[in-house]
Image (spheres, helix red, strand yellow):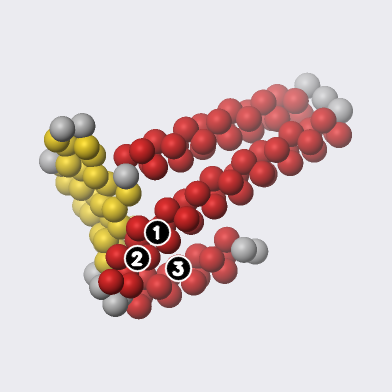
């Protein structure tokens, strides 16, 4: 098992990676609450992000090559949809794991952070 500790934006975070029988657990400690994510979810999100990044690179090249603005806008719309999809996946995972744990632990701070994140996400 490896453990990494650092401070970011005034919050202390601990990332713990357990290795055994093919299972890896990714835990975030934020103040009093923890967040555990499956390696499958993390891999799926990272794969989706890689595809979005690749798509953005393609759109950048389209602009560099003076491609038709309509084509660029269509591709930007596709990128936007893909980004919204991965955002929904992260939010759903957060609600089904982290927030469930927060409710079980009566962690009001985590619930307030979720409300703030939703407000930001919905802008």
Across and down, in percent, residue 4 comes to: 20, 47
Vertical order, 105 against 82 (above or below): below
In the picture, residue 96 is in which quadrant? Answer: bottom left
Q: Residue visible at 47% across and 55% down?
A: 92
The CA span between labels 3 and 2 is: 12 Å
Give me the disc on residue 96. 1
Secondary structure at badge 3 equals helix
The CA span between labels 1 and 3 is: 12 Å
Give whichever of 25, 63 is nearer the camera: 25
Give whichever of 52, 22 is nearer the camera: 22
Q: Is residue 32 visible?
A: yes
Which residue is disc 2 drawn over?
A: 100
Residue 81 lies left or right of residue 13; in this view the side is right
Q: Residues within 10 Å of mark 1 (few under 14, many from 20)?
A: few
Q: Is residue 10 visible?
A: no
Q: What is the quadrant of the C terminus in the image?
A: bottom right
Which residue is disc 3 drawn over?
A: 114
């Amino acid at each position: 098992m490896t453990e990494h500790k650092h401070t970011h934006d005034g919050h202390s975070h601990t990332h713990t990676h357990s290795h055994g029988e093919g299972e890896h657990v990714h835990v975030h400690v934020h103040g009093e609450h923890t967040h555990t994510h499956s390696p499958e979810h993390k891999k799926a999100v990272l794969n989706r992000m890689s595809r979005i990044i690749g798509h953005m690179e393609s759109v950048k090249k389209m602009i560099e090559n003076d491609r038709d603005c309509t084509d660029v806008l269509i591709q930007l719309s596709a990128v936007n949809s893909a980004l919204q999809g991965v955002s929904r996946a992260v939010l759903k995972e957060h609600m089904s794991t982290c927030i469930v744990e927060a409710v079980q632990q009566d962690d009001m701070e985590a619930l307030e952070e979720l409300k703030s994140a939703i407000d930001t996400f919905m802008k």
